[in-house]
Image (tube, grey):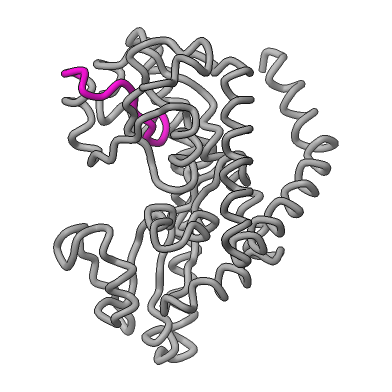
Amino acid sequence: GKFEVSVHPAGELMPAFGVVDALEGDNIEMALTAAYYFTGKDPSFAFSCAVPFGLTARQNAAWRKHGNGGKLLDDFFAQYNFMARSAGNTGTQMGGWYRKEIKTANDLKGLKMRMGGGVFGEAMAKLGVVSQNLPAGDVYQALEKGTLDAVEFVGPHDDQKLGFNKVAPYYYYPGWWEGGADLEFFVNLKKYNTLSAENKAILNAAMAVAASDMTAKYDTYNPIALKKLVADKTQLKAFPKAVIDAGFKACMEVFAEHEAKSPTFKKIHQDMRAFQRDQILWNRFSEFPYNQYVNGVKI
């Protein structure tokens, strides 16, 4: 065709976490990744993926497309020579697999847990969790051997394929650290700006279709996988409110610490929260009462 994208798996051209450096150095044109893996460069990267007690998939799309989120993130990422566009959203994630029950916040202390990137890890450290950065393929064996106590990954569809239910019986919800985790296409700005208007339109349309398709797939396949997990004796557990409250307090402390250090972080965070407050207001009169009723009757 007129416009082609060659796809390379992680590690073929560079290590998976080397894509931002490669984009900055004009060594690649695009990357597909999760922005919160790069919060070591700047914690503001997290806003392009997920932050604890943040936006849902729909809210995130609205903030970025029709709120200020898109411009704020474009301005931020321009310094790294790329723009970020959604590659899809997982929706609200599960709270992870545990080898023991989590009854109080004290049960988190000393827990060795594999988790995603971002400010979530900093908040969990305040609760005493020991973060372990392991590739997904190594998690099963670590849980089986007991060198890992818990893992936070995505949700039923992905988790079932990795077999976590066979080595950790307790599956907790909700994943309050990822109300809607967005994966990203990072597009090299210099390369993008050399494209014709037609090819820019082709690329933008393809990214939009990919984003919509990913979210739809998770919504379709997660309940199917969840039923299979429960049939295989997985024990579904809701996090006690006191545990989530402790997580909320720790997260707000982390946000305040980053705001004090970074005007950019503060600007993006405050705008996102203002947008979220409006979404919560509208939700109280729309989807929340609707879902509350529908979830309580037999369909």
- Is 189 on the left-hand or right-hand side of 255? left
Residue at (23, 41) in percent of width and height: 135
Outermost residue toward the right?
Answer: 285
Closer to the camera, 60 or 72?
72
**How far across and how far down the image is residue 34, in percent?**
40, 54
Residue 124 colored magenta? no
**Image point (34%, 68%), residue name:** 20
Camera-nearest residue between 297 and 88 = 88
Tell me how many marks there are.
Answer: 0
| Image quarter of residue 2 | bottom left
Main secondary structure of the magenta stretch: loop
Left or right: 225 in relation to 77: left
Residue 190: give x, y in percent of width and height: 39, 87
In the depicted structure, whether residue 246 falls above or below residue 122: above
Quadrant of the rendering where the N terminus is positioned: bottom left
Q: Quadrant of the C terminus?
A: top right
Does residue 67 lie above or below 240 as drawn? below
**Image point 47% across, 20% down: which residue?**
172
Write the start and end of the magenta stretch as one range.
144-156
Relative vertical location of residue 258 with respect to residue 298 in this rendering, above or below: below
- Percent across and percent down for residue 54 are 61, 44
List x then y, in percent, for residue 65: 64, 65
